Image (cartoon, rainbow, N blue to C red):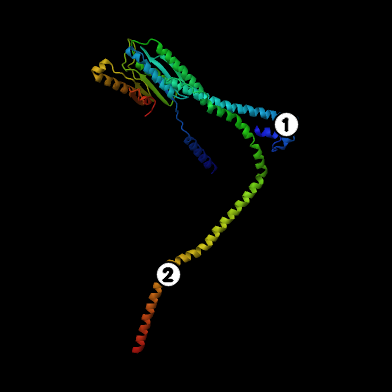
Amino acid sequence: MGLFLLESLRITQLFPRIASMDDRMRHRLMLASLIFLIILAGIESSLALMRDMLITDKASLMRDLASVAPVVEDGWFTRIPMAGQMIMGFVLPFALAFVAIPLESTVHSLRTVIGVLLVQSMRGLAFVIRFVGVMFKRIAKVLELVYDIPIVIPIMIENWVKALRGNVSDKGQIKSGSTS
Amino acid sequence: MKRILLIASVLFGSLFVTACGDSRMHSHAVYMLVDTSGTYAQEMNKATRIINYLLASLNSGDSLAVAKVETRSFTEKDIIAKVTFDKRPSQATTQKRAFKAKIEEFAKQPLGSAFTDITGGLIQGAEYLNETQAGIKTIVIFSDMQEELGQGTVRDFPIKLDGIRIVALNVTKLRTDNADPRLYLDRLARWEARVRKAGAVEWVMVNDLENNMESILKTR
């Protein structure tokens, strides 16, 4: 209803058909929207009052059943929450009607915004996939380097054993050469 | 293949539907029997307090009936007031006020009957509770449980209390009970055996009305 009201007042132009209506028709639409909005706001406000009445009624019944003396009302202090809820219930529909103005801006710019968001998300996805690819490419090298650390000692031992064996066999050859 | 898929989807669908929600009725129906015989008629104030407690505790969709126990209690004429609370809270509040007014009007009347037909009251209560189709059914007996039947009143036959909770309240001790406590204990034991044989799901006795009133409606 609020949307139709602002459309008929030409504050927003979400529906060009309404803006291009003739003045008499547009005026009637405006009045109808305003009356409906006031009725709905009134209903919401009266619901707040009914809620308070129901709660008071139930509390009064519970006091009667418990044979407790009725509570003496403190005056207007106790009615502040109910009054606040009634006022908010009435005003909120009108306040929400003005949401149509930013809604219009959103609708007009939504296409561009979605496009920019999509482009950025694609770029982000490309970066992530490229990063994962590079990681998998480099991981083999990293594993090799990591392997080098524990294997260096066994290789040193191997070389030392080979060197020892080499010395022993050389000494044996020299001994057999000298005796022949 | 299509038939197999159809059967599988029907089975799965039925399993899904039956798994959703709780199909039990959660409403509570209470039938209160108030003894108005002899000296027990003076306990009416306590009975009114209990009725007020029941009115405060029961919610929309629940049922409450209060009946008096007289010379012969197997009759709807002994029901003082009965109500099934409306779904709308505002209407339920109005109904509770009207019920309370009826009970207060009844309490002002002179009470006292010559005999006490508790069994007749139980049968009448069971009939009322079964008609309500409530999920939890309770008969509250506000009496000293001393049954005295008049001439021509036949009550020595098996009764049916299937699925009903029996709560005995304020079972006062008579002078003879004070002289010989076995009379009191035997009386209660006989009642408990009789109602359990009749199919009652629970037998609760509440004498401490100051501190233990929640036991009236609490199921075990």
Query: Could one spot residue B86 in this view of the protein?
Result: no
Give the number of marks.
2
Please state the chain letter of the residue tagged with numbered disc 1 in the rendered image: A
> The N terminus of chain A appears in which quarter of the rendering?
top right
Q: Position of residue B118 (x, y in %)?
A: 35, 16
What's the residue at 44%, 15% (across, down)? B102
Task: Report helix, strand or loop for mark 1.
Answer: helix
Return the disc, 1 or 2, that comes first in the chain's sequence. Answer: 1
Task: Report helix, strand or loop for mark 2.
Answer: helix
Residue A26's tag is 1
How many residues crowd around disc 2 within 10 Å: few (fewer than 14), some, or many (20 or more)? few
Instruction: Give the labeled residue for mark 2.
Output: A152
Please state the chain letter of the residue tagged with numbered disc 2 in the rendered image: A
From mark 1 to mark 2, how far is it between C-alphas? 90 Å
Residue A161's tag is none
Q: Nearer the viewer, residue B96 or A96?
A: A96
Three-letter residue code for mark 2: Val
Q: Position of residue A37 (x, y in %)?
A: 64, 29
On the rendered structure, is B186 left or right of B65?
Answer: left
How many residues crowd around disc 1 within 10 Å: few (fewer than 14), some, or many (20 or more)? many
Query: Could one spot residue A54 in this view of the protein?
Result: yes
